[in-house]
Image (cartoon, helix red, strand yellow):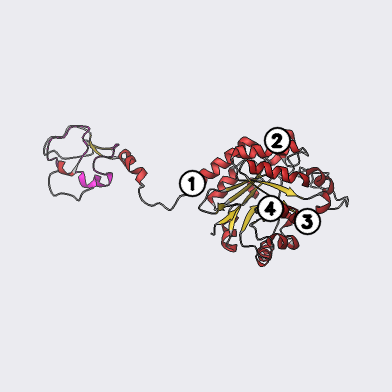
Amino acid sequence: MPTISIGGRAVGPDYAPFIIAEMSGNHNQSLDRALALVDAAAAAGVHALKLQTYTADTISMDTGFVIREEGKSLWEGKSLYQLYKEAYTPWEWHAAIFERARQHGLLAFSSPFDETAVDFLESLDVPAYKIASFENAHWPLLRRVAATGKPVIVSTGAATLSEIDEAVRVLRGAGCRELVLLKCTSTYPASAATTNLRTIPVLAETFGCLVGLSDHTMGIGASVAAVALGASVIEKHFTLRRADGGVDAAFSLEPEELQLLVDETTRAHQALGTVQLCVQASEEKSRIFKRSIYVAKPVAEGEVLTVDNLRIIRPGDGLLPRHWDVVLGRRAARALQPGTPLTWDALLGEQTPAA
């Protein structure tokens, strides 16, 4: 897989996963809380902070459409327009939020939901763009984002394979050269059983681009497992405290959990290592803790070695256990005391190849 650069940071299989902290509407319409969320994300060690850039009027109309999912939705009974008025991040906050992120050394960018949002974000010189799952079939938006020439991260939730293929073709045809596809399950929260992480390497192979996970499950287990399957980018919603409420709070990580996500995905990436089918240098000293053949009872010179006077025990400084059948029935070349590791020169007769 290729390596890409987001705001000067290398992202790809050879690097620790790129962790994106998604603020979404968890600012609860308070700029002070939004800035506190930036501080918390930076303290947790994430690499990037992400917003969502829309207004209720750029994403929907007050048509009266109400969310009805028989109690399965966090937003049951709300109209789309009402939900977006509650969840949106005021555009006049973006500059202050991005500046706070820069002060912490964090990259900051956003998910635009229409072309006017892209134009606005361009004025803030964002380093990348994220396409939300529900916008991955919005071809005019895809073309506008691709035309910026900046890296594009696309969530693939609620999309068929052909729709993902169309989105990739539209983006590449419009100039996108640095692309990341995120496996995503567009339920809020998502369950582990519907996360289907085995899709990640298939996306990578099919589209020849970097892959990752937009994770709406509770906890960090899915994200850590995703790294083992090749995820180079992890996106996770976060909040200060779930008890504070908010449109996305129920499936968002708290700061301590966000730091754990950073730490454990980094460890998971380090643990992948390379294919190792031999003893590593770091293991050489540990070979002494393997078993070997030892004298278990006093043995006189010329006495036959048997299962009664020999044992296979630790440490491993005698003949290896694979020589057990060769050693049994041989005679001792000299008197042997219990606790002595057996060696070839302690045996009479024809020598056996060295251990």
Separation of residues labelled 4 and 3 (CA atoms): 14 Å
Q: Nearer the viewer, residue 165 or 103?
A: 103
**Are the residues flagged by discs 3 and 2 in contact, CB closer than 8 Å?**
no
Label 4–label 3 contact, CB within 8 A? no
Q: Earlier in the sequence, mark 4 or mark 3?
A: 3
Tag nearer the camera, 1 or 3:
3
Give the CA distance from mark 3 to mark 2.
Answer: 32 Å
From the image, tell me which residue sits under label 4.
125
Q: Nearer the viewer, residue 282 or 76?
A: 282
Which element carries disc 4, helix, strand or loop? Answer: loop
Left or right position of 73 against 208? right
Chief secondary structure of the magenta portion = loop
Residues at circles 1 and 2 in contact by the CB criterion of under 8 Å? no
Density class for disc 3 (Cα within 10 Å; few <14, some 14-19, many ≥20) is some
**Magenta part of the protein: which range?**
313-342
Q: Which residue is mark 3?
A: 116
Q: Nearer the viewer, mark 3 or mark 2?
A: 3
Mark 2 or mark 4: name the one nearer the start of the chain. Answer: 4
Residue that numbered label 2 is attached to:
242
Are the two marked residues, 4 and 1, in contact with CB atoms closer than 8 angstroms?
no
Crowdedness near tag 4: few (<14), some (14–19) or many (≥20) residues, C-alpha within 10 Å: few
Q: Amino acid at mark 2?
A: Arg
On the rendered structure, is 354 left or right of 46? left
Residue type, numbered disc 3: Thr
Q: Where is residue 195 drawn, in percent x and y?
A: 63, 50
| Residue at 57% over, 62% down | 208
